[in-house]
Amino acid sequence: MHVLFIIDPLPSLKAYKDSSVAMMRALVARGHRLSVCYQPDLHIDEGVVKAVCQAISLVPEADLHGHDWWAEEGEAQEAALHGFDAVIMRKDPPFDMEYVYATHMLEYAEARGARVFNSGAAIRNHPEKLAITEFPEFTAPTLVTRDMARLKRFHAQYGDVVVKPLDGMGGSGVFRLRPEEHNLGSILETLTLEGNRSIMAQRYIPEIKDGDKRILLIGGEPVPFSLARIPLAGETRGNLAAGGRGVAQPLTQKDREIATRVASKLAGRGLLVVGLDVIGTNLTEVNVTSPTCFVEITEQTGFDVGEFFAVALERAVGA
């Protein structure tokens, strides 16, 4: 297969822990070719979705902590997305309007035969925090609104709640509001932009102390280990970007129940790779943009998540 990755600039990637790089390495190990392009290079020319694409090779035995782990092969070429065997959308958020336009272009490319994972429509139609609404049996009490009075009533009802923006990532903008929170009004005004932006409020889940588990679904099958992202002392957020410590652990029976239910509901929607966030027994997010934790799980358990992905991709495209 010739696989195109739509990705952040290669020099910006921390290759030693980047899940997209783990995908690339697994594909190359199985004899596949790679090209990359960047989101700003996507364009529509006379109805055909194209990009400026650079073929690359991976440098054997490279130091993944450095910047010389890949090499360009020839000159960059403009190419139609439907000319590749598979297109992997791995551009990180922010999920701004340029990202939305990119999902539309990916959808147009799919109409001409491109095989895109995750598909443009699927990414756009599964907002990562709101997507838990499909699975109320697994979620803590949750409110989504911009209305200050509703948010204050929710806080009064549950006493200890977490509030967060709908478009945040890496734990940014997440606040825990305890019963005695004296800055309640100020925090809610800031997050809602004075009532002009909807946010999510959830009852605080005390099991966060044991970690915010990332469960990976690849090709509809759960990876048998999760990565529990355990918060720093005194911190509410377990995100690795917020200083959380990642500890791989086997899926529990409840983890598998959640994963199986979500996988069955999402089947057929064009989602090859999904990252579920689970705290205790509560599903808190369904990540579809660029789910991570491949490397941490592989290094700690020996289960090769990149290989698992490559096999699932081959199966999806019939390679």
Image: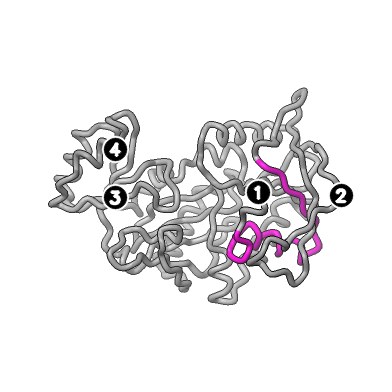
| 127 to the left or right of 148 | right
User: Which of these two is toward me, 76 or 261?
Assistant: 76
Residue 258 badge: none
The residue that label 2 is drawn on is 74
| 215 to the left or right of 105 | left
| 77 to the left or right of 223 | right
Q: Gap in Å between the C-alphas at discs 4 and 1?
A: 32 Å
Mark 3 nearby-residue class (10 Å; few <14, some 14–19, many ≥20): some
Give the residue type at disc 1. Pro
Look at the numbered disc 4 and give the secondary structure of its residue. Answer: helix
Q: Earlier in the sequence, mark 4 or mark 2?
A: 2
Specify the segment rendered in magenta.
Answer: 14-38
The residue that label 1 is drawn on is 9
Q: Which of marks 2 and 1 is nearer the N terminus?
A: 1
The residue sitting at 77% across, 23% down in the picture is 46
Q: Gap in Å between the C-alphas at discs 2 and 3?
A: 49 Å
Q: Gap in Å between the C-alphas at discs 3 and 1?
A: 31 Å
Disc 4 + disc 1, Cβ < 8 Å: no
The residue that label 3 is drawn on is 175
Q: Gap in Å between the C-alphas at discs 2 and 1?
A: 18 Å
Look at the numbered disc 2 and give the secondary structure of its residue. Answer: loop
Mark 2 nearby-residue class (10 Å; few <14, some 14–19, many ≥20): few
The residue sitting at 53% across, 62% down in the picture is 293
Disc 4 + disc 2, Cβ < 8 Å: no
Mark 1 nearby-residue class (10 Å; few <14, some 14–19, many ≥20): few
Q: Earlier in the sequence, mark 4 or mark 1?
A: 1
Residue 190 badge: 4
Q: To which quarter of the image does residue 298 belong?
A: bottom right
Disc number lying in front (3 or 1): 1
Give the residue type at disc 4. Thr
| 259 to the left or right of 73 | left
Give the residue type at disc 3. Phe
